[in-house]
Amino acid sequence: RKKMKLAVYGKGGIGKSTTSCNISVALTKRGKKVLQIGCDPKHDSTFTLTGLLVPTIIDVLQEKDYHYENVWPEDVIYQGFGGVDCVEAGGPPAGAGCGGYVVGETVKLLKELNAFDNYDIILFDVLGDVVCGGFSSPLNYANYCLIITDNGFDALFASNRIAVSVREKARTHQIRLAGLVGNRTSKRDLIDKYIETVPIPVLEILPLIEDVRISRVKGKTLFEMAQNDSSLNYICDYYLNIADQILAKPEGVVPKLLPDRDLFTLLSDFYLNTNVSDTPVNKDILELITL
């Protein structure tokens, strides 16, 4: 079975896991068998699919006294809404150990278990920014990276660092950047300013929708909520559009290199030369970038 591997990254708190879960369900709606792997020590990537915090690979290994040979796929794979299978890597206690190392070992264990063989799509939902080699390890296996962002300074700064990581990995691996997904934003002017300098496809822009936030609290995808409320179907269409573009196997890009200082200059010029500084949030950003 020929499979596609997709690594989803984005600034912490941007709605990456909620978006990942809805994309996973959208892919199953298109007839694909999907495995979503949560690569975050908080182990809450698949909460919206399962409605609970499933036992992590680290939990299972502790129960097995770290005898990898005693771990079976059914010990770590849980089925979520829409038939999406779910795995959580987990990690060490807060302030102890290396979460990035656990992510790398999770991928290694699942490969050894041949757990990938029964799926059309493997989706890695990875911790925020690429901060170390462990958290970048899904890029070693993925065909595509998808970055979740918004129209703000911090999210685009994180997006650029992820893009730099994709560029570096593309030297030796098959990875390509499929594109950006703008989440929880009614505007895209800053996104457009960024992609003028670093050409990256924009797959979708999702407006700020309260039902998306509520879905996370309820532990349900928008697709599950829409079963009892047809007014939510239009939100599902955003995710179906993203899924269709991914399934079309886009060429993807190797991102252009934009150093951090150049990005600061680009975004600060945008804020200084437009009227976006009218709101309190943007005034705070303006103070930051003009220090």
Image: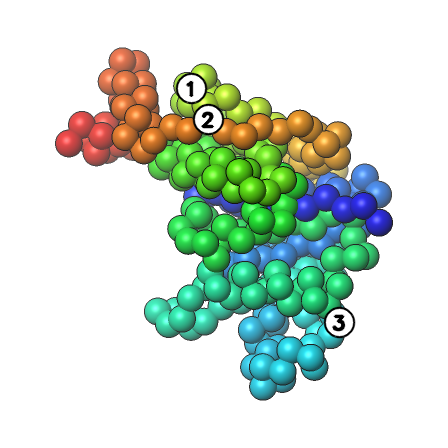
N-terminal-most mark, 1 or 2? 1
From what the image shows, is residue 1 above or below residue 238?
below
Q: Amino acid at mark 2?
A: Lys
Camera-near label (1 vs 2) is: 2
- What is the spatial separation of the Cα atoms under label 1 and label 3, in whole angstroms? 46 Å
Q: Contact, CB < 8 Å: mark 1 with mark 2? A: yes
Q: Amino acid at mark 1?
A: Thr
Give left or right: position of 30 versus 66. Answer: right
Tell me, for residue 197, which label it has, or none: 1
From what the image shows, is residue 48 above or below residue 229?
below
Q: Position of residue 208 (x, y in %)?
A: 51, 33
- Local packing at callout 1 (Cα closer than 10 Å; few below 14, some 14-19, many 20+) is few
Q: Position of residue 34 (x, y in %)?
A: 75, 51
**Residue where numbered disc 2 is placed:** 256
Q: Amino acid at mark 3?
A: Glu
Tell me, for residue 74, which label it has, or none: 3
- What is the spatial separation of the Cα atoms under label 3 and label 2, in whole angstroms? 42 Å
Residue 2, image quadrant: top right
